[in-house]
Image (spheres, rainbow, N blue to C red):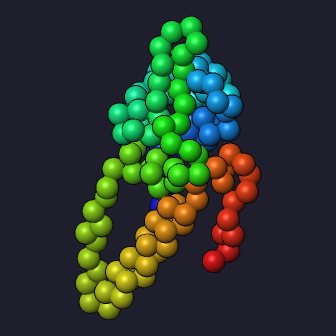
Amino acid sequence: MRLSARTQYALRAAVELAAAPGAPVPAERISAAQHIPRRFLDNILLQLRRAGLINSQRGPDGGYWLARPAAEISLADIILVIEGVTQENDRFPGVSEPLEKVLGALREHQNHLLAEITLAHVAGGSLPDLSR
């Protein structure tokens, strides 16, 4: 699986919000902490807000925060919002046909793993066992 820079930035921004105390986090702080270009970050935060994963508040005490507890937002949730659903239509002819099953199983394993790991796991540094 290859994740775009946009998706990697979205994951980093979401983890930054997960690690923050209860107050709204200004976009400037997320940008500086995660080295994400500000204009790029603003678009990502808008996309995450429209998807209902984060909330925002304007003004001097404004910023962004997670819409649900970090333990309820998986990495797959973030990736799905940014990357969208992909259709895997690759067909392998002849003797290479079994590769379809192998690659399908690989995608399924990746999706399961990303759905299992939450922002709380990453922000807390307590990842589940990844050796399975």
Q: Tell how many labels.
A: 0
Q: The C terminus appears in which quarter of the rendering? A: bottom right
Would residue 40 be seen by someone viewing this image from the given angle? no
When the figure is inspected, residue 34 is found, relative to residue 5, above or below; the finding is: above
**Residue drawn at point x = 53 percent, y = 52 percent:** 72
Residue 89, image x, y percentages:
25, 69
Apparent side of residue 42 relative to residue 21 in the rendered image (left or right): left
Apparent side of residue 42 relative to residue 120 in the rendered image (left or right): left
Residue 110, image x, y percentages:
50, 67
When the figure is inspected, residue 111 is found, relative to residue 71, above or below; the finding is: below
**Residue drawn at point x = 68 percent, y = 38 percent:** 19
**Residue drawn at point x = 58 percent, y = 12 percent:** 61
When the figure is inspected, residue 109 is found, relative to residue 51, above or below; the finding is: below
- For the residue pair 39 and 58, the one nearer the viewer reads as 58
Apparent side of residue 45 relative to residue 24 in the rendered image (left or right): left
Apparent side of residue 28 relative to residue 104 in the rendered image (left or right): right
Residue 100, image x, y percentages:
34, 80
Q: Residue furthest bottom?
A: 95
Q: Residue furthest top?
A: 60
**Residue drawn at point x = 29 percent, y = 80 percent:** 92
Residue 59, image x, y percentages:
51, 9
When the figure is inspected, residue 125 is found, relative to residue 82, above or below; the finding is: below
Would residue 112 be seen by someone viewing this image from the given angle? yes
Residue 99 in which image quadrant: bottom left
Residue 32 in which image quadrant: top right
